[in-house]
Image: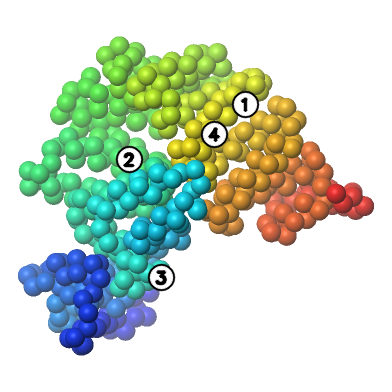
Amino acid sequence: VMANLPANPLTLLDTTADNDAPDEPEAAITAVTRLCDNKGCSKPGSPDKRCGKCFVACYCSRDCQVAHWRDHKAQCKCNRAFVLKPQTEEHLMCLQLDFAKYFIDNFDGDEGGFVRYKEHFDKLGSVGEEAGRSIKSVTVGVLEVLRSGDLVRLTALAELSSRNCINDWSLHLEAKKALQPALVKAHKAGKVTEEEVLDGIQSLGEAHMWMRQFRECKKCYIKARDGFVRVLGADSAKAVHAAYCVASQNEDDRAIAEYRRLWEVAKVSLRDEDFTYSIANHLGIQLRKKGEHQEAKAFYLAALEGQRRVLGKHHKDTLMTLNNMGSLNYDMKNFQGALECYSEVLSVQKRILGLHHQETLASTMNLANTYVDGFKDFTNAEELYRFALDGRKKTLGKNHPETWKSAQDLARLHVLCIPNKKKVKEIVQEFPFLLMNPVTGAHIRRFMDQRQGQIE
C-alpha cells in the first residue's frame, strides 16, 4: 500500500492565510497547546498544519513534517484505517452540540441518559463537530484523544464508550489500550500507584473479553492477578477478584474447582465485595451447563441475595444474575418462573437503560421466546419480536447480526406458529438474506409453496 503513495504523501494544510479570520472553535484552540509531533522539536504545533492524510499528526512547519514522515507513516496508516461506528459518531456530535432532544428521542424512558453521558464528555473535552474525516471531524478528534496520552481524557473516553453509556466495545478497547501506557508513565512520575496501574490492566482484560479476544484477555487477567498478589497479598480482595477473572476464561472442571475454592474464601472474608457474588453466579452458569440444575439454582439464589444487599436490586450485575435464573427456569421447563425473572429484568432495564439499549432488547427477545415456548402466546411474542427488531434496526442498523437474528425469529414465528404469508413476504423483502440461511430459508420456501392461497 505504501509503495503506491507518492514519495512524500503528506499534504501540509495551512488555512491561516487570512489573519483577520475569527478564532477557531474550542477544538482548534485546544490543539494549539500540542507540541510539534516531530521528535526533538519543542515548538508548538499548529492545528492547521497537519498530516494531509490522517489529519492527526500536528507540526510547526513543513520541514518538521517531512522529517517526521519516516516515523509517522506506520501510525498514519493505522489512523486512516480507524473508523467510528456511525451511531457513536452521531452520539458524540450531539453531545458536542448539547443536543439533549436527540437522546430523549433515541432513548425513550432514559431521560437521565444525556446527563450521564455529558458528565464524561465534559472531561473528554471537544472532539469535533463534523461527520466523516476532516480536521474538525469527530473521528479525528477521537483519534487525537487516543494518541494524546492524556490520562483524564482517555479515562473519560473509556467511560463514555463503556456498556453504561455509548456501549461501543471496539472504541472502549482502543481507549483502554491507550490508557495503559499513560498509567505506566504517570506511575513512573509518581502520580498514580502501582495498584492503579494493575487496575488498568484488569479493566483492559475485561475490554478484550467483550471483544471476544480471549487470549489477550487471559494474559491481562493473569498479569493483574500476579501483580495484586505481590503488592496486596493472595487473600486481598483484588487478588481474589483477579483470580476469579482468570478462572472465568476456562470452561472445564478446573474452572468449577477454582470457583468453589474462591467462593469458600470470599463468602467468609469478602462478604461485602460485589465480585464475591459474581463468583457464585459463574458457578451457577457452569453447573447449569453440566445439567446440575438444583445446585446451579442454589448458587444463583446466593448470588442474588448478596448482590441485592451489596449492589441493590437494580444494578446491572444483579439483573444479569436474575436473567440467568430466568434461563435456568426455562431449561427446567418452569416457564412461569422464567417469565417472572425476565419480566422483572426488562422492567428495570427500560427505566434505567432506556427502551432501545441493547441489553433491554436482548431481554425483550428472552421474554418473547418464553411466551412462544412456554405459553404458546404468539400475540405477545409477535409484539415483542417486532419491538426488538425495530429497536435493533434503529440503533444497530439493518446489517448487524443481532438485527438479523430478530428478523429471523419474527419470520419463523409467522411461518411455524401463526402462519401469515403477507407478513413473511414483507420480512423477506426487507431481509432477503433469510432465504440464504439453510434452515430458515428452507422453512420459508416450503411455507410459501404450500400456502399459495393464504393471505391474512
Give the spatial CA distance, label 1 vs label 2.
34 Å
Give the spatial CA distance, label 1 vs label 3.
44 Å
Proximity of marks 4 and 3: CB atoms separated by less than 8 Å: no
The answer to whether residue 100 shows anywhere in this view is yes
The answer to whether residue 452 is above or below residue 235 is: below
The circle on residue 132 is: 3
Q: Position of residue 165 (x, y in %)?
A: 39, 46
The amino acid type of the residue labelled 4 equals: Leu
Q: Which label lies toward us, 1 or 3?
A: 1
* Mark nearer the N terminus (1 vs 2): 2
Outermost residue on the bottom side: it is 17
The circle on residue 162 is: none
Q: How is the image coloured?
A: rainbow
* Mark nearer the N terminus (2 vs 3): 3
The amino acid type of the residue labelled 2 equals: Gly
Label 4 environment density (alpha carbons within 10 Å; few <14, some 14–19, many ≥20): many
Give the spatial CA distance, label 4 vs label 3.
36 Å
Proximity of marks 2 and 4: CB atoms separated by less than 8 Å: no
Q: Residue at x 30, y 40 (%)?
A: 203
Label 1 element class: helix
* Mark nearer the N terminus (1 vs 3): 3
The circle on residue 339 is: 1
Q: Position of residue 94 (x, y in %)?
A: 39, 60
The circle on residue 346 is: 4
Q: Residue at x 15, y 80 (%)?
A: 61
Name the residue carrying label 2.
205
Quadrant holding the N terminus = bottom left
* Mark nearer the N terminus (1 vs 4): 1
Q: Position of residue 376 (x, y in %)?
A: 75, 30
The quadrant in which residue 69 appears is bottom left
